Image (spheres, rainbow, N blue to C red):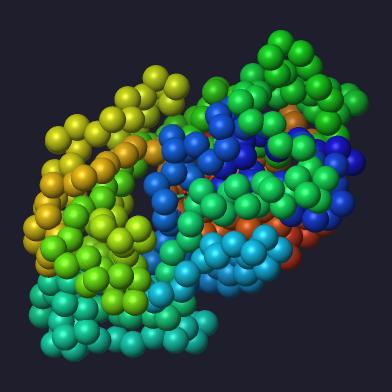
């Protein structure tokens, strides 16, 4: 069986590795260079969380992803996943806090719920108010996305896969004898095709409706007065919803700056190829507010900011399934700003589905036809 993968970002690169590992003849096409900064892979780190605010139904997939990240590390000799712990901060009435607590209870996640005084003593880089819930768990941390993607692709290549950078696929057509792809004006035939095109998926599938859309997300790096206070040992990753600001952060990985981002919906992008990925002052206002009101010791002027695209779905859960009239194509996307950590488990599931087998950890909850995604 010959399988093409369109888009070698988070899902495509990890799927290519899984396909190659299953002995499938796999060919990957990426429109840009590998691990390009414009995609969902750019920006040096991605949160890995197991006490999951998006819902406890993700925990089996997250646990499987963790096993597979460790497997990829063992195969490549690269350190990709660093579990330095994570803080969840929010108001007790917040549904996200309830879902984190449900994940912890159902799956016995090693954690501590900290009283405000204890939280302030242990994590002085944060400002906590007395009515906030603070949960510290040990099954969270961060991934190195560019390294993860390039490592997966290198390993896939070693196992026999082909990797083609700077190769945009223009069209996908299901015909009687397989699935045909148009690249640089020529058509190539495959038995099956996996589409993992992230924020660019509507260029291949213009019939995808409004339940799937692309967003620009912003990451910023801030200088610290005492950078040692933001080292991975002292500053766990965090997600926080306070006073309507939903933020996240990662410790200093290169020793001079701390990355903080805002998860409140970024702006919707109609044409991913024309979007301006530079960051305006207005776009930084919420992140500055977070730095000034909820953190101690960071300078509110970022020394670096960047914009990156991801595909969202109307309910913020992934969409996985066959586009109408294309039984040989599996479309996987819509990870809504939280998919990176899941990538190896999704890659494994996609491989199984393409081979006509059940996914080792079910992804049926993400069936694309639950939403009116196609016109
Ligand atoms: C700023 C930001 C921060 C995030 N933080 C986190 C986090 O902390 N934790 C977490 O788990 N997730 C996080 N996410 C989400 C996660 O990164 C994405 O959900 C994930 O990358 C989506 O994977 P994907 O493969 O669908 O898309 P991508 O990773 O974007 O990959 C899609 C790839 O397809 C390529 N492509 C598109 N069209 C074509 C074509 N026609 N031909 C060839 N190639 C094509 C693109 O160039 C791209 O490389 C974040 C996302 C962003 C943008």
Q: Where residue 335 appears, x then y in whole percent?
A: 50, 48
Rendered position, 193 above or below 46: above
State left or right for residue 200 relative to residue 125.
right
**Left or right: where 279 falls relative to 62:** left
Q: Is residue 97 left or right of residue 199?
A: left
Name the residue: 37% across, 29% down.
269
**Residue 352 vertical position relative to residue 226 in the rendered view, above or below:** above
- Foreground of the two, 329 or 35: 35
Q: Position of residue 2 (x, y in %)?
A: 86, 38
**Quadrant of the image for the C terminus?**
top right
Most distant residue in the front direction:
255
For the N terminus, which image quadrant? top right
Where, by quadrant of the figure, is residue 84 drawn? bottom left
Residue occupying the point 22% across, 66% down: 227
Residue reaching furthest to the top = 185
Residue 101 seen in the figure? no
Q: Is residue 162 above or below residue 240?
A: above
Describe residue 279's horizontal placement relative to residue 340 as left or right. Answer: left
| Tally of marks | 0
Residue 300 image offset from top left, x and y in percent: 12, 51
Q: Position of residue 250 (x, y in %)?
A: 33, 62
Q: Is residue 109 visible?
A: yes
- The residue sitting at 21% across, 78% down in the picture is 123
């Amino acid at each position: 069986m010959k399988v093409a993968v369109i888009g070698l970002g988070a899902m495509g690169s990890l799927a290519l590795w899984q396909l190659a590992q299953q002995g499938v003849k796999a060919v990957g096409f990426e429109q840009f260079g590998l691990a390009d900064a414009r995609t969902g892979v750019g920006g040096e780190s991605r949160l890995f969380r197991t006490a999951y605010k998006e819902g406890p139904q993700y925990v089996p997939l997250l646990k499987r992803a963790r096993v597979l990240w460790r497997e990829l590390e063992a195969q490549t000799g690269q350190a990709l996943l660093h579990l330095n712990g994570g803080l969840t901060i929010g108001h007790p009435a917040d549904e996200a806090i309830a879902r984190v607590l449900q994940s912890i209870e159902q799956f016995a996640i090693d954690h501590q719920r900290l009283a405000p005084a204890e939280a302030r003593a242990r994590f002085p880089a944060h400002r906590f108010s007395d009515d906030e819930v603070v949960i510290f768990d040990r099954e969270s941390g961060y991934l190195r996305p560019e390294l993860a993607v390039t490592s997966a692709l290198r390993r896939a290549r070693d196992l026999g896969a082909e990797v083609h950078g700077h190769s945009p696929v223009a069209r996908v057509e299901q015909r009687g004898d397989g699935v045909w792809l148009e690249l640089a004006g020529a058509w190539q035939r495959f038995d099956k095709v996996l589409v993992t095109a992230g924020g660019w998926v509507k260029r291949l599938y213009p019939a995808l409706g409004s339940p799937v859309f692309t967003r620009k997300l912003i990451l910023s790096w801030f200088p610290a007065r005492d950078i040692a206070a933001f080292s991975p040992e002292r500053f766990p990753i965090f997600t926080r919803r306070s006073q309507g600001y939903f933020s996240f952060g990662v410790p200093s990985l290169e020793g001079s700056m701390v990355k903080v981002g805002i998860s409140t919906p970024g702006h919707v992008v109609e044409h991913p190829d024309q979007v301006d990925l530079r960051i305006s002052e207005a776009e930084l206002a919420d992140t500055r507010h977070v730095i000034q009101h909820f953190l101690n010791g960071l300078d509110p002027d970022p020394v670096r900011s960047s914009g990156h695209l991801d595909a969202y779905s109307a309910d913020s859960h992934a969409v996985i399934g066959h586009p109408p009239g294309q039984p040989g194509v599996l479309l996987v996307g819509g990870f809504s700003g939280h998919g990176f950590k899941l990538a190896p488990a999704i890659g494994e599931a996609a491989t199984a589905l393409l081979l006509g087998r059940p996914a080792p950890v079910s992804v049926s909850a993400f069936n694309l036809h639950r939403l009116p995604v196609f016109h």
